[in-house]
């Protein structure tokens, strides 16, 4: 019996918060940002994407004073519609803005 070839490990994909109808990721509750950002803090998103994020992928959020990258730590597919998901993300990196939007 021959062993099945292993699939090559995919590189993490970076997603952006926001988007348009049927192709977006949004915060489930803006109030979740009203607290200290301790290490390991969990934030919640909902999205609709052709390629649903996987644990380990990243999410970039642009805020008024900084850009923050988050890592997907849990992803739950909805199934109906098939492109919808709920996910948990944790912050992994922050860059402060210097006077204007980061392009």
Image (cartoon, rainbow, N blue to C red):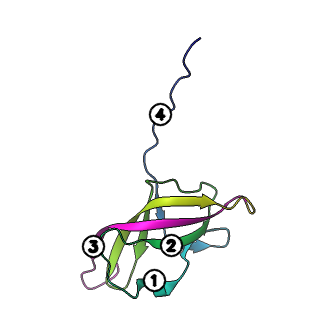
Q: Residues within 10 Å of mark 1 (few under 14, many from 20)?
A: few
Sequence-wise first label, 3 or 2: 2
Instruction: Tell me the SS state at disc 3.
Output: strand
Residue beneath label 2, please? 44
* Viewer-side label of 1, 3: 1
Q: CA distance from mark 2 to mark 1?
A: 8 Å
Sequence-wise first label, 4 or 2: 4
Residue beneath label 4, please? 8
Sequence-wise first label, 3 or 4: 4
Q: Which residues are magenta?
A: 82-103
Sequence-wise first label, 2 or 1: 1
Are the residues at dot 2 and dot 1 in contact (C-beta closer than 8 Å)? yes
* Viewer-side label of 1, 4: 1
Q: Residues within 10 Å of mark 4 (few under 14, many from 20)?
A: few
Sequence-wise first label, 1 or 3: 1
Q: CA distance from mark 3 to mark 2?
A: 21 Å
Magenta span has 102? yes
Q: CA distance from mark 1 to mark 3?
A: 20 Å
Residue drawn at (34%, 74%), measured in percent from left and top?
A: 67
Q: Residues within 10 Å of mark 2 (few under 14, many from 20)?
A: some
Residue beneath label 1, please? 32
Q: Which quadrant holds residue 25?
A: bottom right
Residue drawn at (64%, 56%), measured in percent from left and top?
A: 50
Q: Which quadrant holds residue 75?
A: bottom right
Q: Quadrant of the C terminus?
A: bottom left
Magenta span has 95? yes
Q: Position of residue 58 (x, y in %)?
A: 43, 60
**Residue closest to the eye, 3 or 27:** 3
């Amino acid at each position: 019996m021959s062993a099945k070839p292993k699939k090559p490990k995919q590189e993490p994909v970076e997603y952006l918060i926001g988007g348009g109808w049927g192709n977006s990721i949004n915060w489930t509750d803006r109030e979740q940002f009203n607290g200290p950002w301790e290490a390991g803090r969990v934030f919640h998103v909902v999205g609709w994407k052709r390629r649903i994020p996987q644990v380990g992928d990243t999410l970039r959020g642009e805020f008024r004073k900084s850009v923050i990258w988050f890592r997907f730590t849990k992803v739950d597919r909805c199934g109906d519609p098939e492109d919808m998901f709920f996910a948990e993300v944790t912050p992994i990196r922050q860059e402060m803005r210097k006077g204007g939007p980061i392009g």
